Image: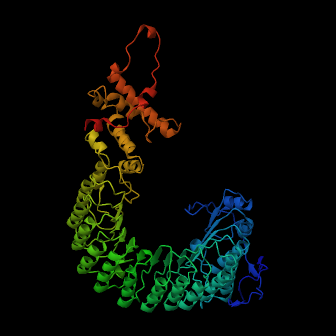
Amino acid sequence: MVEVHRANSNSADEPDGDGNIGDSDSEISAFEIENDSDIEDEEDCIEDPDGPILNNDSLLQIKCNDPDITSIVVYDLDHRIGRKDAGHYIGDNTHLNQLFIKGGTMPWESPLAALSMLARFCDGLARNSSIEDLNISDCELSIGKASNTPEIKKLSAYIVYRTSQFCFQNIKLRSIELNYCDLGDQGARVISSALKKKDNKSFLQQICLSTNEISDIVAKELIESLKGYENLEILNLASNSVSTQGCAALGDLFSSGAVKLNDISLTNNRIGDDGISAFITGLANSTPSNEIRLDLRSNRGITNVGWLTLNAYLQNPSCCIVNLDIGSNSIDDGCIAALGKAVASNTSLKALVLSADHEEDLVPIPSAAWQSLIPVSLHSDSVLQDIYLESCHIDGEGLDVLANALNNNPRIKVLHLGDNPQASGMAWKNFFNTCMQSPTTSLEALFLCENELSDDVIADMAQVLSNNDTLEVLDLEKNPSITESGWENFSRLFCDKSSINSTYASNHKLHDLGLQELPPELVRLLGLNEKENKKEVAREKILLSHFLDGQNDTDFLDVELGVLPHVISWIGRDYSGTPETEDTSHNRSSRNNVRVLLYQLLKRMPQLLPSRTPRYAGKKRKFSCEFFSRGGDIPLALKQQ
């Protein structure tokens, strides 16, 4: 049996035995935690992009304060050998700066045992002073949940309290994320109290408390506790119950000039017209020097009155919103038309998101509304660069309107049109032909997943893109009707092998099709296109497609002698455009291929070599390939044009 003791601190409010928050001088009873250390540890095979997984090896590194381990991901705090002391070792570590606790895989079918281990872990965590980013997700930490037993409430309260102590005491803390933890009002108040009492407020940059059942009044208290955090940039309160009071507090926070928030997520809350008005009023009365990203997705309580208030602010010359997400909301035709006018006159908005989360949540926007929104918002005077229209029921008529508008707007860089299968194949063909061949297009990323695109549409698309030199990303994921025949069109797009000139003129810009499984040849060509030096991409494609098989080196026989040195030099250059000197496996393979080609060329054209003279008689000559690595960088195909 292992005891968990309270640290000697009166810095933050503590939970009493019933899970309630009391004064900091109250006592916490020791928790007794069952621990079975007789079961052998199993090998962890999970990989995580956030850092190494907590296992016996990484735990030893943490215990030894290894400077090479600066982040750790905790998936499982259970009875396996050594795990019971993980929090203790983390508390003493001075090199960790990121900690992720992902409770989704913890044994919550035995919540008391899981919470007991987490409580012990947080006991050690509270002592740590090096961690800058704390992320806890998918852990059931509800203090006030009626269905929880007193023991679970008590443990949850203790975990939240110890976490708040860590936040209070750690002056280096930059980011705290407690997402999907069901903190409830009591847990959120503990965090709020710690933040309010914290002395050093200059480091904290991010607070994320999404999906925690936080009420409007407690959200107000939490936001008010953020005054003085002058470097706070990100606030995420998504999927709670923020309404008028929380929005008013947020508006006051801006008007007071106490923070420089630039990323606010209020997705899926209970914001209505009064809430959006209170927030916009505070924002309009502030003088923020920063650009703001605002997410109001899925707030169905906002009616025409609220949307018109927002539209009016967008037309304000002092508007500072650069990214606005109002997807999955109920916006009628009149407000859509007003939004188009507001965006057209706005001088700050770079990204507009109108996408729906799910098709069943969608309130379709009629074609008439698209005709009032798209041409106006995409006017050439608009500064809009990215537009998101997934799951918006855009039909053929809507695509025509969009394509014509894009023709007149050279600023749009990113366009999301995924999950709009209402448009026919012919409508998609017309869309590509209209906007992708325009000399004014500047699209760099186009997302077309889940649109039921077929091989014949893909063939037309590839043909159009042969003359496009701006598009880098084309997301075609989840279009199962595209077969191997359709993908062959893209292989020809990236490397037309009909002639050297055709290969040189192929598309070397597009490098991402948004798919994991593609034909090997297409994957190889996409990999080549990722390289920044497009002349070298073309060079490599020409060598691989026309010469390295040893069958087409006769193409050099008709080259004029004055041009030939440049051609030979072009062959001998490496993929970065400079002579190959670094001794890597890639370069060794490249040099071998080049030597094979040069050897084949010299066999075909022995006149390139100096004639034998008496001083070479009876001696072997050494021929240096350095001769071939001087000169121009243009291929024969270009010389002949």
Question: Which residue is at a point 39% across and 70% down the rendered structure image?
Answer: 350
Question: Which residue is at a point 35% across and 31% down the rendered structure image?
Answer: 566
In the picture provided, is 313 more to the left or to the right than 255? left
Displayed quadrant of residue 36: bottom right
Q: Pinpoint residue 23: horizontal percent, then vertical percent.
A: 73, 90
Residue 271 in view in this figure: no
Residue 199 in view in this figure: yes
- Residue closest to the far right: 8
Up the image or down, 624 lies above or below 433; here it is: above
Quadrant where the N terminus sits is bottom right
Displayed quadrant of residue 303: bottom left
Q: Pinpoint residue 355: horizontal percent, then vertical percent.
A: 36, 75
Return the residue nearer the eye: 332 or 412: 412
Up the image or down, 522 lies above or below 426; here it is: above
Q: Pinpoint residue 500: horizontal percent, then vertical percent.
A: 28, 39
Question: Which residue is at a point 43% across and 31% down the rendered structure image?
Answer: 629
Q: Pinpoint residue 90: horizontal percent, then vertical percent.
A: 71, 67
Return the residue nearer the eye: 171 or 399: 171
In the picture provided, is 470 more to the left or to the right than 367? right
